[in-house]
């Protein structure tokens, strides 16, 4: 039987619809992963992760080539040094003796020489934190607004407008209280010039006609 053009088109519509459905299916790299913070230490030639306020230890597996193994080696001054890590990954069953399993790291948010970062009471409320030096500055942003801290000046609380920019970055802007403030962050490895801490965002603060450089990371209130 010969198909007319209209019949041929009708016969192919289900195929087109199926192709569109398959093409539109989103893939979320965060599915099945959890963001977690904890302490890193080296033992037996391996890098171990101990979640905050837990005694379990997991062998680090850099599943997404985040560079966490080399970053930790560079940051630790001595073999016994402990570091704080903020990562996203997936915990798996026991793979090694004397450990509780393996942590497949998919994303590195921050890595720093600290054993007290687990005690940060503000982390879960923050959406973003950024800071820099020369001169020192710090910004904490949450659902209630942002607070700008600078050396020699009182803390400056401001409401802000958040916008996404091409490339996965963000801008936080405010025109309140006679101040024009802009904070730009972009997904790029950034090293704190004072502490050597590694962050996953490069930051730029524009305030009082000046542009200040720094690093940043997403807080616990932002799930990405």
Image (cartoon, helix red, strand yellow):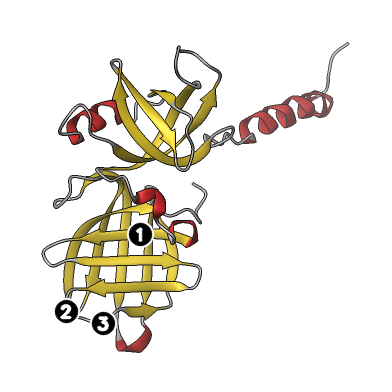
Q: Which mark is residue 129?
A: 1
- Contact? badges 1 and 2 (CB < 8 Å): no
- Contact? badges 3 and 1 (CB < 8 Å): no
> Mark 1 or mark 3, which is nearer the start of the sequence?
1
Q: Residues within 10 Å of mark 2 (few under 14, many from 20)?
A: few
Tell which of 224 and 103 is nearer to you.
103
Residue drawn at point x = 71 percent, y = 29 percent: 16
Residue drawn at point x = 27 percent, y = 73 percent: 149
Residue drawn at point x = 41 percent, y = 39 percent: 38
Is 174 left, or right, of 97 in this rendering?
left
Q: From the viewer's perspective, is the residue at label 1 or at label 2 nearer? A: 2
Is 76 left, or right, of 92 in this rendering?
left
Q: Is residue 98 visible?
A: yes
Q: CA distance from mark 3 to mark 1?
A: 18 Å
Quarter of the rendering occupied by the N terminus:
top right
Read off the residue under disc 3. Answer: 154
- Contact? badges 3 and 2 (CB < 8 Å): no
């Amino acid at each position: 039987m010969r198909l007319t053009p209209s019949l041929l088109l009708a016969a192919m519509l289900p195929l087109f619809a199926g192709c569109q459905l398959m093409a539109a299916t989103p893939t979320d790299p965060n599915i099945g992963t959890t963001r977690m913070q904890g302490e890193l230490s080296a033992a037996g030639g391996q890098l171990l992760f101990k979640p905050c306020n837990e005694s379990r230890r997991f062998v680090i597996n850099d599943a997404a080539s985040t560079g966490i193994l080399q970053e930790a080696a560079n940051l630790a001054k001595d073999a016994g040094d402990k570091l704080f890590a903020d990562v996203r990954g997936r915990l798996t069953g026991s793979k090694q003796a004397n450990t509780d399993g393996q942590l497949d790291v998919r994303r590195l948010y921050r890595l720093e020489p600290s054993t007290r970062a687990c005690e940060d009471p503000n982390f879960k409320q923050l959406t973003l934190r950024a800071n820099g030096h020369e001169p020192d500055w710090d910004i904490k942003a949450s659902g209630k607004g942002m607070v700008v801290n600078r050396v020699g000046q009182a803390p400056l609380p401001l409401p802000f407008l958040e916008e996404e920019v091409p490339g996965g970055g963000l801008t936080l802007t405010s025109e309140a209280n006679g101040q024009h403030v802009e904070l730009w962050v972009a997904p790029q490895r950034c090293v704190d010039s004072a502490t050597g801490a590694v962050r996953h965002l490069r930051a730029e603060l524009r305030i009082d006609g000046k542009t200040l450089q720094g690093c940043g990371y997403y807080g616990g209130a932002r799930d990405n």
